[in-house]
Amino acid sequence: MPAGLNLPAQYTFVPVDAGLHTFSTSAGEAGSYTLQAGEAAAKLESAPVSIKVKQATLKVVPTVAPVGGVAEVTVLLVDETGAVIKTENNAVFTVKLVEGSPNQSVSSSALTQTVTITQGKAIFLLSNTEAEAVTVIPTSPFGIKSQSGVVNFGPYLREIRELGI
């Protein structure tokens, strides 16, 4: 059993397996892992399979929006080099928002439901009735690291966008 993976050292097939069993696990750290299966009684052994595990981070992309407007918040799932992990389509996370002035003027459906990554990216909407910076903190139940980001709600952004500047 590779160090860092939570897999059973032994497994006994049961009739409902019908000869196939899937194991789910997560790695304790990034790196290469080698897996090999065998059947002791029949002295069968598979060829080793190497699996590369990347260190993933949920990264909030900073953005701006006008007061009273809506910000489109993007969260990327990136590897240790900063590249988006586009093969991920099922990771979920929750969001915590920290207002610059704690006055409960910010709202988002992401506060009451999980957000799902699709092709390495998730987008949700955030609105605010006050001019302030709102820190967005994603949290994964799978222990994925996170990098918070800030959405700045400003009073003059609406006028700038209307003027096309």
Image (tube, rainbow, N blue to C red):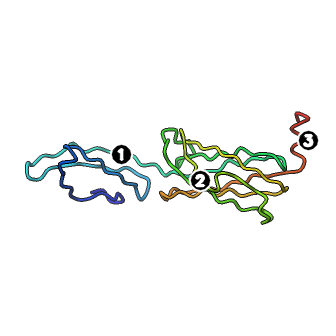
In primary-sequence order, the first of circles 2 and 3 is 2
Find disc 2 in the rendering and name its residue.
113
Find disc 3 in the rendering and name its residue.
159
Q: Position of residue 145 (x, y in %)?
A: 54, 57
Q: CA distance from mark 3 to mark 1?
A: 52 Å
**Side (left or right) of 137 relative to 43:** right
- Kindly state the secondary structure of the residue where label 2 is placed: loop
Which quadrant, please, contains the N terminus? bottom left
In primary-sequence order, the first of circles 3 and 1 is 1
> Residue at 91% of width from left, 41% of height from top?
159
Kindly report which numbered mark, 2 or 3, lies closer to the viewer in this rendering.
Answer: 2
Find disc 1 in the rendering and name its residue.
51
Kindly report which numbered mark, 1 or 2, lies closer to the viewer in this rendering.
Answer: 2
Badge 1 local density, few (<14 within 10 Å), some, or many (20+)? Answer: few
The reply to whether callout 3 and callout 1 are in contact (CB within 8 Å) is: no
> Residue at 52% of width from left, 38% of height from top?
86
* Residue type beneath disc 2: Gln
Quarter occupied by residue 139: bottom right
* Residue type beneath disc 3: Glu
Closest to the observer, 51 or 135 = 135
Badge 2 local density, few (<14 within 10 Å), some, or many (20+)? Answer: few
Residue 87 numbered tag: none
In primary-sequence order, the first of circles 1 and 2 is 1
Badge 3 local density, few (<14 within 10 Å), some, or many (20+)? Answer: few
Which quadrant, please, contains the C terminus? top right
Residue found at the very far left of the displayed protein: 42
Q: Position of residue 37 (x, y in %)?
A: 21, 49
Q: Position of residue 149 (x, y in %)?
A: 69, 54
- Kindly state the secondary structure of the residue where label 1 is placed: strand
* Residue type beneath disc 1: Ile
Q: CA distance from mark 2 to mark 3?
A: 32 Å
> Residue at 77% of width from left, 45% of height from top?
70
